[in-house]
Image (cartoon, rainbow, N blue to C red):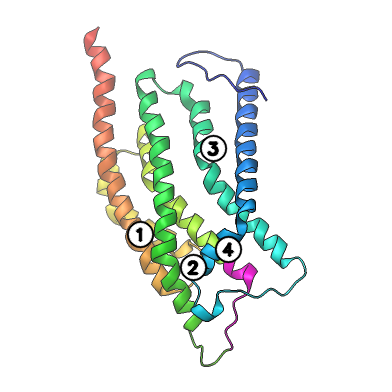
Amino acid sequence: MRIPRRLSPGEEASLVEHLDELRSRLVISLVALGIAFGVAFAFHAHLLDWLNQALPAGKRKPVTFGVTEPFVTSIKVSLYAGFALALPVILYEFWSFFAPAIEKHAQRIVAGFVTLATLLFAGGVAFAYWVVLPPAVHFLTNYDDNLYNVQVRASYYYSFAALLIVGIALVFELPIFVLALVRLQVLTTEKLRRNRRIGYTIMVVIAVLLPTVDPVSLVFEAVPLLVLYELSIWLSVLMEKRWRRAETEPAAAR
């Protein structure tokens, strides 16, 4: 497979060349996802055991109700894990495609954003697994347990746990998303600070939309979202100053 050449800043290319580069980078991303999926599937027993640790002591072997459920469930969990493993490659290919549209002096900053995005995703996975998932599972499996014979079905539980972890991990990318909008001048730090209340409301709505149905995990999701939003504002203030200074210095040197 041919590795696509990254265009230099300001280098012109035809529409066909852009589409060819986009196709090549999509293929690389899909190949990385396929390899990561294969690795995750090879260790899917460990992944399932890892997710089972959040369940009550007597329910750490979920039940299945279909012939295909064990296989399909293992495939789904491996896909989620494969996406997490392949994320650095996917982010790098995304950055490489848009690099020509970015000034030469800013490319190193964008490369740093890719690293930061990967670290934020990993932090989101850790936060979801150790902080959000255990109390959420405890609340849900003990709710009205005197009225029901609570059994944990494998496909439902693993889908819930995987979506919760991946969803929170993606939400942890909020600072990168906000910085990108500020860099593209879609947003300004002045607007972000002036509309804090609206931003806080949106963060709470996002927390509600995450895959959870209990108030315990909702609180655990909303609080870091608000913190991340505030962090995004101050990080944007810092980077906006640096970007403006970098743009004015060449003009002053002429």
Q: Which residue is mark 3?
A: 90
Which amino acid, by three-letter code, is at mark 1? Answer: Thr
Residue 115 at x, y percent in the picture: 40, 37
Q: Which residue is mark 1?
A: 201
Give the quarter of the image for residue 131: bottom left
Inter-mark Cα distance, 1 to 3:
31 Å
Residue at point 43%, 36% (across, down): 114
Sequence-first tag of 3 and 2: 3
Count residues near mark 4 (Cα–Cα under 10 Å), then give few for <14, some for 14-19, many for 20+.
some
Q: Which residue is mark 2?
A: 212
Count residues near mark 1 (Cα–Cα under 10 Å), then give few for <14, some for 14-19, many for 20+.
few
Residue 97 at x, y percent in the picture: 53, 27
Q: Is residue 239 above or below residue 41?
A: above
Inter-mark Cα distance, 3 to 4:
25 Å
Count residues near mark 2 (Cα–Cα under 10 Å), then give few for <14, some for 14-19, many for 20+.
many
Q: Please identify the quadrant where the C terminus is shown.
A: top left
Considering every residue shown, the one lying at the far left of the view is 252
Residue 15 makes an appearance in the image: yes
